[in-house]
Image (cartoon, rainbow, N blue to C red):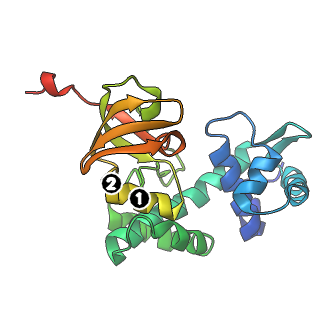
Amino acid sequence: MIPLVQTKKVLSESQEDYLKQIYLLTEEALLAGTQALADKLGVAPASVTVMVQKLAELDLVHYEQYKGVKLSENGTRAALEILRHHRLLESFLQKALGYSWDEVHEEAEKLEHYISERFESRMADWLGHPSHDPHGDPIPDAALVLPEAGQRVRLVDQEVGFQGSIVRVSTQDADELNLFRQLGLIPGNPVELTQAGLEAVRVRGKNGIFLMPLDLGSKLQVVVSPRLGERE
């Protein structure tokens, strides 16, 4: 087994991108499929297979041919480290430099591979050690431990009449983030599910009532709020 302190030094930008995407894909599935990785990274499936085999040789992933891939313990720590960089950078870009939340992802993608541990530490200090980035994504702490997830659920999985507060918007697409911002559907704001169908949902947010495709609505994660009639 190759110690993490060694693998961190030899990982390329591309390898870090793979580890990060495998981590994100396996948040909701046991294995990340080759095609799903190819789609996320914009490469051919054959290229994914070659890279995954290299990562397996570095003891960073466990790969099952025709089934998929998951991170090893070393791979998980490496992925959490790059996620910490990325999400701290998103928070810093928004808070210190005035970037909007739909702009920060692209910039953080470029910078996450190059910041030093000293810069990471000072950035975290300046920000006050946030637990979540502007989109509600959890930020691993300095020991690479994630904050408690709490009782967050997907809005579209709830019954009509559900009322809650948005805690995470799980997309990295700039156009989708810009739309959610314009609609007022951002972390910390209230939301209510007023209608549900097989292809679309209608939600009441801070800025009004909106009909949106089910795929888009599925990216809103919420926590339960007291019903209006039960509030003091």
* Residue 24, above or below 121: above
Which residue is labeled 1 in the image? 179
Q: Which amino acid does label 2 sit on?
A: Leu
Q: How many labels does the image show?
A: 2
| Side of 174 relative to 189 (left or right) | right
| Side of 4 relative to 152 (left or right) | right
Q: Which amino acid does label 1 sit on?
A: Leu
Q: Do the residues labelled 2 and 1 touch (CB within 8 Å)?
A: yes
* Crowd tier of the residue under label 1, counting other residues whose Cα lies within 10 Å: few below 14, some 14–19, many 20 or above: few
Residue positioned 39% across, 43% down in the render: 211
Looking at the rendered structure, the secondary structure element under dot 2 is helix
Which of 174/3 is in front?
A: 174
Which of 139/77 is in front?
A: 139
Quarter that holds the C terminus? top left
* Crowd tier of the residue under label 2, counting other residues whose Cα lies within 10 Å: few below 14, some 14–19, many 20 or above: some
Residue positioned 44% across, 59% down in the render: 177
Looking at the rendered structure, the secondary structure element under dot 1 is helix
Q: Position of residue 27 (x, y in %)?
A: 61, 39
- Which numbered marker is on residue 195? none
Q: Which residue reaches farthest left?
A: 232
| Side of 1 relative to 100 (left or right) | right
Q: Position of residue 47 (x, y in %)?
A: 88, 60
Which of 113/44 is in front?
A: 44
Residue positioned 35% across, 58% down in the render: 181
* Residue 59, above or below 47: above
Which residue is labeled 2 in the image? 183
